Amino acid sequence: MKDYIKYYAGVDIGSVSIKAALVSNRRLIAAELVASGASYKDAAQKVLYSVLVQAGLDAESLSGVVVTGLGSESAPFPARQISDISCQAMGCHYLFPSARTVINIGGQFTKVAKITPQGRVVDFLMSEKCVAGSGRFLQVIARILHVTLENIGPLSLQSREPVEFSTNCAVFAESETISRIAEGARAEDILAGVHRAMAIKVAMLVKGVKMEPDVVLMGGGGEDAGLVLAIGEALGTRILVPEQPRVSTAYGAACLAELDLAL
Amino acid sequence: MPFAGIDIGSTMTKAIIVDHEEQILASVIGPTGAEHRHLALKVMDEALQKAGLAMEGLDFIVATGYGRISVPFADKQITEITCHARGIRALLPTVRIIIDIGGQDSKGIKLDTEGKVANFVMNDKCAAGTGRFLEVIAETLGVKLDQLGKISLTAEAYVQISNTCTVFAEHEVTSRLAEGASIPEIVAGLHEAIAGRVVNMVRHLGMEKDVVVTGGGAMNIGLVRAIENKVGFPVLIPPEPLLTGALGAALAGHDFVRRGVTPDHGRRRERVTFFQ
Amino acid sequence: MKPASIQLDELYVQRDKHAKELRDSGKKVIGYFCCFVPDEIITAFDMVPYRIQGSQNKAIDQADAYIEPMACPFVRSCFNKALKGEYDFLDGFVAPHSCDTVERMYNIWCQNKPAPFNHLINVPHMMGPSSEKFYRQELDYFVKSLENWTGHNLDTGKLRDAVRLYNERRAVLRALYDLRKSDPPLLSGTEITAVLVAGMGIPAAKHIELVKQFIDEVKGRPLPQTQKLPRIFIWGNELDDIAFINLVEECGAWVVMDDLCTGTRFFWEDVPETADPLDGIATRYLYTHCPRSNVPQTKTRAGDLGNRYSYINDFIKEWVVNGAIFYIVRYCDTCELEGPDLREYLNGMGLPVLMIEDDYSTSTIGQLRTRVQAFLEMIG
Amino acid sequence: MEQKEQTKTTAVKGTDMARKVRGLVKNIYRSAHEAKAQGKKVAYMMVSSQYDEIIRAMDVVPIPTENYAGLCAAKREMDRFLLKAEADGYSQVLCSYARIGLGFDSLRKELGGIPEGAPDGGMPTPDMMLGSSAVCDPRYKWFQAAGRYLDVPTYSIDVVWPPVDADLKAVRDHYIQYQKEQFQGLISFMEQQTGKKLNKERLWETIRLSDEAWRLWYEIDRMRVAIPSPMPAQDHFSVMVAGYYYPGMQEAVDFYQSLYDEVKYKVENKIGVIPNEKYRILYGGGLPPWHTLWIFNYFESFGAVFAIERQYRAYDPVEVPSSVKDPVEFLAWRSFLRATQFYEKARANSGNPTVERLLGMIDRYAIDGVVFHACRSCRATTIGQVHYKNILGRYTDIPMMQLVSDMVDLRDYSEAQWKAQIGAFIETLAGRSAR
């Protein structure tokens, strides 16, 4: 049977984590996520292998692979390179055909793209250097608050009076947080404050591409309920989030491998 | 007549108790973290216990460092800059320049011939050149922080890390790795970058012998070597680089008493903790 | 009747309140940037001059979609307020070509949030006879476009009155500053900042009346705590929020004198009363002490510094200053190039200097505490 | 410990003449050193201050300090100068050209000579500094600050341009009059410094030469509408040296004549910069990333060529009324006309002269996309880019992108981010042509 079905893989090599997705007819067969670590090559190899294993396949049964992400150049296997902005757009398109604006909050960058009904990118913006628009910012804060990443969202939602955050620098936000703690601020208020600060930055990017509904939020940021809420408030619109926001760019890459579009 | 100094830094809380001959009776180092107002008291109590004293028995308590404002039992708050100077004056009287590389920021302090602060600089709103920079990168490299120093010494060459923004330096590091640079070369490059930044910052105070390196950075031999490279001569390292601030605070307390400043006896022992 | 201190404080907190009331009563309100747009001219047209300010305590959450974040955060904050409609009450928007960013902002502002009347006054960067003439001609052109817009010609009599009025306000404010010469000073730098900012959105006559009352109130109240504290001179650009000066004074100091866009820079010197009032106005405003204005070099370096900063020297002597703090709002190229020169000059007089560069934001100010306190410990 | 070798960062040029520019650059500093040795007067100056011809006519040898900063960046030799300036108290967000210049002067003073290994033999100590307010504020403040290291006579002039909404008839006379008086002030200052009177015939001659060079250059760029593109933007950022650093010199005229012939030949024989030109990009503005010019070749590897650029293309030729008989007055007129040449168009359409120029280029050069370069430390060429983008969007739907770094300071550049953005931009272009 298997031989008659074509499988395609997408691998998203980010500097924090590497994700792989396996699709057939745009259907997600398997997805996996591993930490990038010091060697992209090994991690990428590992994650692709593990999705194949999940689906009980071997490398030969792959009809096409697309790599994307900041580290896509260091892919250890033959694959087509496509930028993560196009991949996230395509992934978003197949997850939410109604989507016109897609936000991706990853470990390092935030990317915003305006897309056509066909999932093509028409305009996009990327978070600037030293801007509190990336997941890194949250990680740093969570660390000093002794809050696990999973608990950031729920905790932040309990906040009544969010702290006003000013700095755009992830590491300096740390010292600001420490002074806030010293002033007696509560964890949830600090987190909510961070979410607000990030939401303002993200909203500015979204306005930059002239937002159109529906708006979809992908990437690690999508798993943070507090962040999703803050962005929704900042934009005054409903935010759609896929089930597995982290792998949705890899999923888009796999779809592109299958479509084999002229890009 | 015992005096206490407590230095609440961004990552470590340090306490010292000295007697009237300025001999150290006890010293404690503990993590700071989010609950530092709670920990401040914990570390203080530990020190008191070691010294076999009660807080009431202390003639003066000075708090310094980031968290200094939130130490309800302190008689006075003084900045770490003044305290570092005071501590070094007692430990290494020949020093004219202090380079302190802490977790959140790095400072340069110039001392006059009496060991008083003549001028100082602090890194402005950018973490490059601080301990955090190294911490973040160590994470990325999967290397233990305390190993960085030794690792870098094994490198013949260093790769240039031009990004001073911590978050973006991570990219640079990973792409250098992808280009095949070795971990030692990269770590050496990071030390080079930090040393360059810090020494450059301190330079406009006017470099002058002797130079001492304090704070967490002093415990990273690779970084210290890189700094010596930039400065052009060997630097001094105090026996307990983390404690100079706390020691200075305790001694400053002694100075206050000498000047007849009376401690505020409304010392509050409440445990304000973060999550309640 | 509330005491003046309270009224001024309310005006400081709600800067646009009174201007909006006046507008509702049929007055036209003209908003402008910086220290190079003569209040006198606007007042002579029976309109209310309104010095545009930002909000140091509010995040800039709109402007980045219109102007790059590496532009002066003060200007970005002002525009951010405009985008939120907080300057919709302005009938006119006037920008001087004070610096690259303000000049650029004029066009961005006009194309996104135009006021009924918009005008840019080109201000020479060089200082000298030909510059005076040119600036005077730019003022003539400004007057002409106001005449076209309002349909009234400028009444020279009213302009003369306006010159006298604003000179009176300058005198009153200088009198207020005199109260800081004593040790301890009779009022804090924090109070002064609030009083000055409060006056930027109301007619001079009202400000004069309030400040006069305030002076009496200050003289009437008990002396502040007499412990000897360092006396600080503040130099920099826009400080229209009390937060930073308050921090300095909290750390144990008196801020007794300043050279800020929101301080002496905008009011200190009088307008000479000339036959044609516009001549006096042109001279006075052109020679405003701002880093963006280039004082012609005189002979040697030392002589040049002396020539550029003698007025600061007077401030420091008369107000018996022990230390100077520079507060530079980031991305101000001219301040960032001027700072080291002034520091060299002040250090030369044996005055210690703390140079701080910061965003235009009250929430970053907490991070400056250690720096300021250490500086005070150093000089104290 | 040694630093590991850097990867190549300069751009591969499209034309032979562009490759010859290196010699012109070297010659700037060589001739300055020679002049100094012969006791001739040399002056720090700011290019395109509208006074360039005066300096040449006064036989003063110019040292373009901004160009030197760009040179240091291209050679990746900027760090020690930047760090020195920062150690002297200059902010890391201050114009990096100024930081290089101040850092260089500081080091030269400290070492009592040219810092070893300074690119092209470094800049000799000037006899005077001539600043101007044209283009940006640091261009006069910088030399004032440099007085800290160089106690030499310094003189700056205003170069004034009216706002786009000004009634040109009402303001023209006082603008031109002031400009003339500013030039006259400069002339008498230079006459004092050199002990020589200005020879007006000589000034006319330098004006004629520079106008001729700029005319030729203008003709060259008009030929660049050709498909495939005969000369890319990275070449422009080289060949500008003749126009900006050799105004009033025969060298400039000769250079552009040969470049004209080369480009003409390439157009006639359809010789493109790259074999398969897919997309034609407009460099919308911002100082070039001197530290990473190979990025233009990175675009080319995707079939995207920069057909034309707005940066370092200050103005098209203008007609000064023949009634103007005095060369200094001519310069004042020329400056005014250059500054205002797109105002009428702007008032009739977008309200913004820069946008008008960009729209004109997009149309004439069959542009598929626009790229801007925001420089963290350059207010003058960066602020407004987002605004231009917004206004342009009302007239065209071609993709536009803003890359952020700095003209000199590598610490503001993130290769990973640029490659990601460029990849997506190319795919956006592809998506459009696929539709």
Image: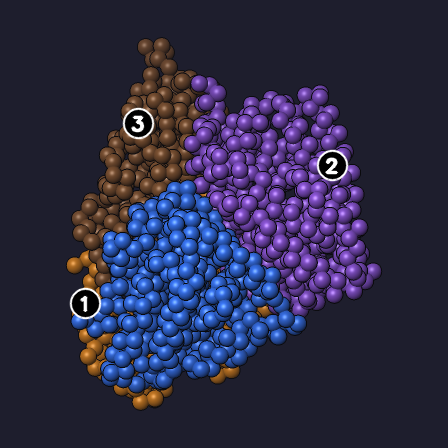
Looking at the rendering, which quadrant does residue A134 occupy? top left
- x%, y% of residue D23? 75, 44
| Foreground of the two, D12 or D390 | D390
C-alpha separation, residue under disc 1 versus residue under disc 3: 51 Å
Q: Are marks 1 and 2 on the same chain?
A: no
Give the camera-side residue of B54 and D67. D67
Q: Residue furthest right?
A: D38
Amino acid type at circle 1 is Arg
Q: Residue D101, can we see it?
A: no
The colour assigned to chain C within the rendered structure: blue
Q: Alpha-carbon distance for marks 1 and 2?
A: 79 Å
Q: Residue under circle 2?
A: D256
The residue lying at 70 percent from left, 36 percent from top is D215
The chain assigned the colour orange in the figure is B
Colour convention? by chain
Q: Is residue D78 left or right of residue B32?
A: right
What letter labels the chain drawn in purple?
A: D
Circle 3 SS class: loop
Q: Nearer the viewer, mark 1 or mark 3?
A: 3
Disc 1: which residue: B271
* Residue at x-position 76% and y-position 39%: D253
- The x, y position of residue D87, in whole percent, is 55, 64
Counting from the top left corner in percent of width and height, residue D105 is at 65, 62
Chain at tag 2: D
Q: Check disc 3: other Cα within 10 Å, few if <14, some if 14-19, many if 20+.
A: many
Amino acid found under the numbered disc labelled 3: Ala
For label 1, the SS is loop
Give the Cα distance between marks 2 and 3: 52 Å
